[in-house]
Image (tube, grey):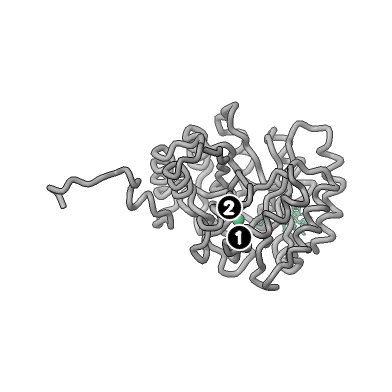
Amino acid sequence: MKQIYLNDVVGRDGLQNEDVFVPTDDKIKLINQLSDAGVDKIEVTSFVSPKAVPNLRDAEEVMRGIKRKSDVVYSALVPNMKGAERALDCEVDEINLLVSASNTHNLKNVRRSTDDTFENFKPMMEFLSNKDAAIKGSLGTSFGCPFEGDIPEERVLELIEKYLELGVDGVTLADTTGMATPNHVYNLCKNILKQWPHLDITLHFHNTRGMGLANVMEGIRAGVNSFDASLGGLGGCPFAPGATGNICMEDLAHMLYFMGYEIEADVDKLIGTSKYLQTLVNHELPGQVVKAGKIADLHSVATF
Ligand code: COA
Ligand code: ZN
């Protein structure tokens, strides 16, 4: 059955929104365990302002401290030129540019209008053009904005076009606050792929309203094969009201594995790493498989 690529974002989306600063050495251990668990890509951190996101102020140390595997892509979120320079200094494999489809959310998130952010991307792309890092364009609030509400499809298509004119290698459509419904996901992805049949699309869902895994299935049905998820279901944007966790990596991997999709990640190792994560953040995580066990984990009748 079809191969699905899994990108873990706990190091960035997960830890950015926690009440506690996870010590650098623990972050490094977490990322190393995720590498061993066989996810295809890891968003390790973000090179943003340490005043805006203090939890990720150790981005350089984490990026340089991890043990890299040749078959894993190590990416980082980058909002501006300063972030691009910092990320390249640490030899990240992939840079994730950041802008929101909603102008209001973009102003909250990066303190610029969406148009100004795209203007700022031009010199960044020039700077990055002869470097080794791949460049992906992330489009926050693609499925709805907690301030503006609906984001029209034409707006998303227009901004994808802008990213492609800049020369990005692919786009990530992010549902920042879990507003996507499954039929919205299917229709939007179908229409995008009708316009750009070879576009490398990643879908990034938050499970804020319980629609995350249903959205993945509709993304797959529309032809997408790459998904962001966060170990334990941690995550959320500090600059969006009501933002909660991403879809949970081990729950996603478990579902896809038992449906017969090909995935590189090892579900048992993900569950083990999720248990380790719980000790770092010191609260219960939203993920479900870590609590219930896999569907193949049967119970003895005698002990029930
Ligand atoms: N890395 C480190 N420091 C940075 C930086 C970066 N990428 N970009 C800006 N800074 C520093 C500047 O050096 C400056 O420092 P100073 O006050 O000591 O002189 C300060 O931040 C302000 O710089 P400025 O260019 O005016 O940025 P800003 O205040 O307009 O903020 C962003 C813009 C994008 C840097 C900031 O809003 C940000 O980092 N947002 C985080 C967004 C995010 O991660 N959201 C969650 C993901 S969805
Ligand atoms: Zn997110």
Q: Secondary structure at mark 2?
A: helix
The answer to whether the beta carbon of the residue marked 2 is less than 8 Å from any atom of ligand 2 is yes
- Residue 246 badge: none
| Residue at figure coordinates x 59%, y 51% from the top left | 221
Specify the farthest residue to the left.
302
Quadrant hosting residue 43: top right
Q: Earlier in the sequence, mark 2 or mark 1?
A: 2
Q: In the depicted view, which residue is nearer to us: 43 or 174?
A: 174
Q: Residue at x 51, y 58 (%)?
A: 214
Residue 288 seen anywhere in this rendered image of the structure: yes
| Residue 196 in picture, x, y percent from top left | 77, 48
Identify whether 93 is placed above or below 298. above
**Mark 1 residue element:** loop
- The residue nearer to you, when weighing 191 against 38, is 191
Residues tagged 2 and 1 counted as in contact (Cβ below 8 A): yes
Tag 1: residue type?
Cys
Q: Is residue 120 above or below residue 6?
A: below
> How many residues crowd around disc 1 within 10 Å: few (fewer than 14), some, or many (20 or more)?
many
> Relative to 76, is 271 on the left or the right?
left
- Image spot of residue 303 (x, y percent): 14, 49
Q: In this figure, which residue is indicated by the disc labeled 1?
A: 237
What residue is shown at x 39% (from left), y 48% (from top)? 279
- x and y percentages locating residue 149 in the rendered image: 67, 73
Residue flagged by tag 2: what amino acid is it?
A: Asp
- Distance (Cα) linking label 2 and label 1: 7 Å
- Count residues near mark 2 (Cα–Cα under 10 Å), then give few for <14, some for 14-19, many for 20+: many
| Residue 104 or residue 215, whichever sits in front | 215
Quick check: 130 left or right of 101? right
Q: Which residue is mark 2?
A: 13
